[in-house]
Image (cartoon, rainbow, N blue to C red):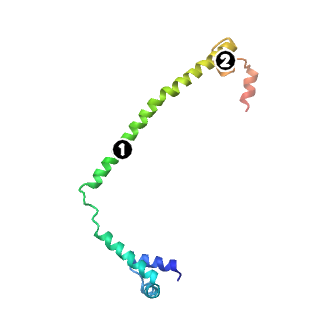
């Protein structure tokens, strides 16, 4: 077995019971490889440290965290709406000014302001329309 397979076997031994063959193979590798022994010692120390750790030192910790997350989400939504509302005049007013300028240009160049002239189809004949609908 190569080092990676032995390392994986060592990790599996921490989580589950190995077969007799795998256990013998791991014991032989541990007897011959000092680096693997150090890894086993380190993993066992980490496992003991995690078992001693108490995760629920603060009562209702999860509920407190979830309440905080929900309030941050609500604040983010309000901030987004405020940013859009603040940006609206900066975008809408230039768009309105551009639309008015284009309509004035159409009126000056065509002499009339109706739907056909705005769309650019005021000189369209029935034959032209039939030709366009073929595509």
The spot of residue 123 in percent (x, y) is: 73, 17
Residue drawn at the location 40% of the way across and 41% of the way down: 76
Pick the front one: 41 or 65: 41
The spot of residue 29 in percent (x, y) is: 46, 86
Pick the front one: 134 or 51: 51
Q: Earlier in the sequence, mark 1 or mark 2?
A: 1
Q: Quadrant of residue 117?
A: top right
Asked which secondary structure carries label 1, the reply is: helix
Q: Quadrant of residue 115?
A: top right
Q: Residue 117 — which label? A: 2
The spot of residue 72 in percent (x, y) is: 36, 44
Is residue 57 in view from this perspective?
Answer: yes
Horizontally, is 24 left or right of 112 in the view? left
Horizontally, is 59 left or right of 101 in the view? left
Pointer 1 with pointer 2, Cβ within 8 A: no
Check the image and report above or below for 4 versus 126.
below
The spot of residue 101 in percent (x, y) is: 61, 18
- Mark 1 → mark 2, Cα distance in angstroms: 51 Å
Check the image and report above or below for 126 versus 111.
below
The residue at the far left in this view is 59
Horizontally, is 77 left or right of 127 in the view? left
* Mark 1 crowd level (few <14, some 14–19, many ≥20, 10 Å Cα): few
The residue at the far top in this view is 111
Q: Which residue is mark 1?
A: 72
């Amino acid at each position: 077995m190569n080092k990676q397979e032995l390392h994986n076997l060592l990790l599996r031994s921490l989580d589950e019971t190995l077969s007799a063959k795998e256990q013998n193979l791991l014991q032989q590798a541990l007897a011959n490889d000092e680096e693997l022994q150090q890894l086993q010692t380190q993993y066992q120390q980490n496992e003991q440290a995690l078992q001693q750790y108490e995760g629920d030192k603060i009562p209702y910790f999860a509920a407190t965290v979830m309440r905080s997350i929900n309030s941050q989400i609500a604040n983010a939504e309000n901030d987004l709406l405020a940013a859009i509302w603040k940006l609206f005049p900066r975008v809408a007013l230039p768009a309105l000014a551009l639309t008015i300028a284009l309509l004035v240009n159409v009126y000056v160049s065509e002499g009339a302001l109706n739907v056909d002239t705005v769309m650019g189809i005021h000189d369209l004949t029935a034959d032209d329309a039939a030709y366009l609908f073929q595509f």
